[in-house]
Image (cartoon, rainbow, N blue to C red):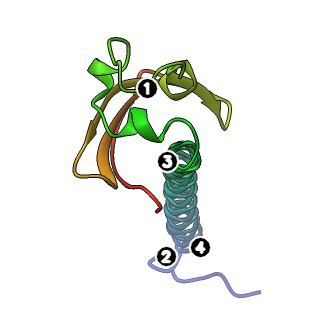
Amino acid sequence: MRLPHPQQRGFVLPLALTTSALLLLSSLSLQTLALHARQRSRQALATAKIRDAERSVAMAFQRHAVVAYACLLALPSSAWDASEHCQGVNPTVLQSGHVVDLDWQLLHWQPYGAMAGTLQLRWSDGRRSLLDLELLP
């Protein structure tokens, strides 16, 4: 049996260690990419839920605008309690509610013309929203 030349001894161990290190680094890189993708996906879902909740509140305001609450929506929310314009209409329906596992509270409604306005909300998670709303005729 022939022995390897002294300069050729031990090349397998460094090669194996280098290959293992490369495999470890590449798998860590793939894992990091997967975690970032998961985080972006969660953020996109949270943003979609927020936008959905805001649209739900906007739709509720639009629905109430065509019935007895239309006279309230012609006024800023700060004038609702003192309004003689809307006798017998209780503004509490428009001042708070529950949508998509979150409670909301009206901070301010400011109409612009007869069919539009800005809706400012505070959510139960502490977030605030400012929505430009166009009321349906």
How far apart marks 2 and 1 lie (CA) works out to 101 Å
Q: Residue at left 56%, top 42%?
A: 64
SS under mark 4: helix
What residue sits right under mark 2 in the picture? 6
- Give the percent coordinates (x, y) of residue 9: 54, 73
User: Is 51 placed above or below 110 here?
Assistant: below
SS under mark 3: helix
What residue sits right under mark 4 in the picture? 12
- Give the percent coordinates (x, y) of residue 98: 64, 28
Q: What residue type is disc 1 on?
A: Cys
SS under mark 1: loop
How far apart marks 3 and 1 lie (CA) works out to 21 Å
Q: Residue at left 68%, top 31%?
A: 101
Task: Give the mark toward the camera: 3 or 1.
Answer: 1
User: Is 14 placed above or below 98 here?
Assistant: below
Q: What residue type is disc 3 on?
A: Ala
What residue sits right under mark 1 in the picture? 86
